[in-house]
Amino acid sequence: MNRKLGWTGELTRAAAQRPWRVLGLWVLLLVGSFFLAGNLNFTSDGGVASSDARRASALVREATGQELRAEEFVLVEAADGPLDEQLFGDTVSSIVEDMRALAIVETVVSYQDGAESLRTVDGRMALIQVTTTLAEDDDLEPGAPVLATVEEANANSALRVTTIGSLSVTRLFGEMADETFQKGELIGIATALVIMLLVFGAVVAAVIPILVAVVAIFTAVAIIATITQIWELNEFTVIVTTMVGLAVGIDYSLFIVQRFREERDRGFEKLDAIAITGATASRTVLFSGIAVAIALSGMLIMPDILFKSFGVGTMIVVVTAVAAALTLLPALLGLLGDRVNWLTLPIVGKRRPPESSGGFWGSITDVVTAHPAVSVVVTAVFLLALTAPVLTMNLGSGGISMLPDDTDERHAFDVVITHFSDGIITADVVVLAPDVSTAEVTHGCEAAHKHVVHDFG
């Protein structure tokens, strides 16, 4: 074949000529990735590395020499009906005693210590304020015994015992993320497989893009695990990385596999078809990956550690997806050849000749190219109409209000806010100025205090 292939074409041809070597290298890479992935060291802090909240925390630590401690507010509630004061008091006393016995707990305060504001006037609700030795920015996993004590009290008491705080919210968000991740990936892979079957009309061809995407994701996670040893990344990084990895991995592989099939239908030999595909489709995939990675790098300039983490993870998985598409995929095609069309499905597996311009998409293309100006106007109007809802978008920040209504943590939060907010739920406000005693700063603090009292009572 007398055709300039470029380095992408030569690379894919070389991979197809030595498929077992390439596959062996990828297998070794996957084995190494499996072990490296076990070293993920994420931060559970969904906050921001240089946000106002983190800056305030650092200023408090610098001024006082102390960290802001992780707290839990344990809520004890009596059921409807006559109040059993003995049971209520014994339950609160037992929880306080168990909490104080934990090494991770620094202080425990209840209404029995004279803090009358920690019990409602009707006596049916009480709050136990538990302060741990953990800093809010620390890994909060060691605080699990505190939550276990609450769960045990709730299970063994006739009263309802729930909690809200740094430990419980962090754990719940982690559980929700894991559940969403597992369900989302199963749904995503299943949906992708159905789409691939409709596109290719053959089981083997449909499975290959998913396989390549999964390999790219595993490799990316291993690289991310290595980075977490020296750089702080958020625990949700893997979830976003997997989502993007499936998208670009499948998309890139789909493009290449389809082009290979078309070149084979045109009569080219297997290696020539792979080389031509590498010089065309694979080259497009390479530049597409570069463009996507550059676009994603914009998240690295954000101060929020969440966006930085997403930027790092998604850029890495795009790179691994491109690498797999340029090496692993040609090796698989070199081994399979026309067997990529195995297990062809009836009806949807029927293929048109590569020169054919018929079909739905062919008709659309003919209309657009025949009337380009009209097509541009119609498409622009349609896209603007789709984006119109953005003007009425109601944005908010993530927090406890996002928790499901049926969770104990959300219940405890709502009760605490309603019945115990006065003097219990507080916020540390840090004022940074050359001289905080000036009249301007004083008036500003007073105005801010009045605004908060007016808005939140």
Image (cartoon, grey):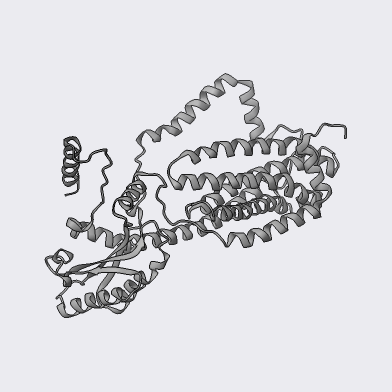
Residue at (33% x, 55% y) in the render? 400
Please state the horizontal and vertical placement of residue 425, each as a whole percent of the image.
Answer: 23, 56
Q: Quadrant of residue 11?
A: top right
Please state the horizontal and vertical placement of residue 142, each as a whole percent of the image.
Answer: 41, 67
Which residue is nearer to you in this view: 74 or 305?
A: 305
Residue at (35% x, 56% y) in the render? 403
Q: Is residue 453 above or below residue 42?
A: above
Q: Is residue 250 visible?
A: no
Toward the right, the furthest residue is: 1
Q: Is residue 342 above or below residue 259?
A: below
Please give left or right for residue 86 compared with residue 268 in the image.
left
Residue at (71% x, 36% y) in the render? 283
Please state the horizontal and vertical placement of residue 371, each as a whole percent of the image.
Answer: 60, 20
Please state the horizontal and vertical placement of residue 291, each as a whole percent of the image.
Answer: 60, 35
Residue at (44% x, 33% y) in the render? 387
Q: Is residue 399 above or below residue 387?
A: below
Q: Is residue 410 visible?
A: yes
Placement of the N terminus among the 4 image quadrants? top right
Please give left or right for residue 266 compared with residue 427 in the image.
right
Toward the top, the furthest residue is: 373
Which residue is nearer to you in this view: 84 or 21?
A: 21
Which residue is nearer to you in this view: 167 or 194?
A: 167
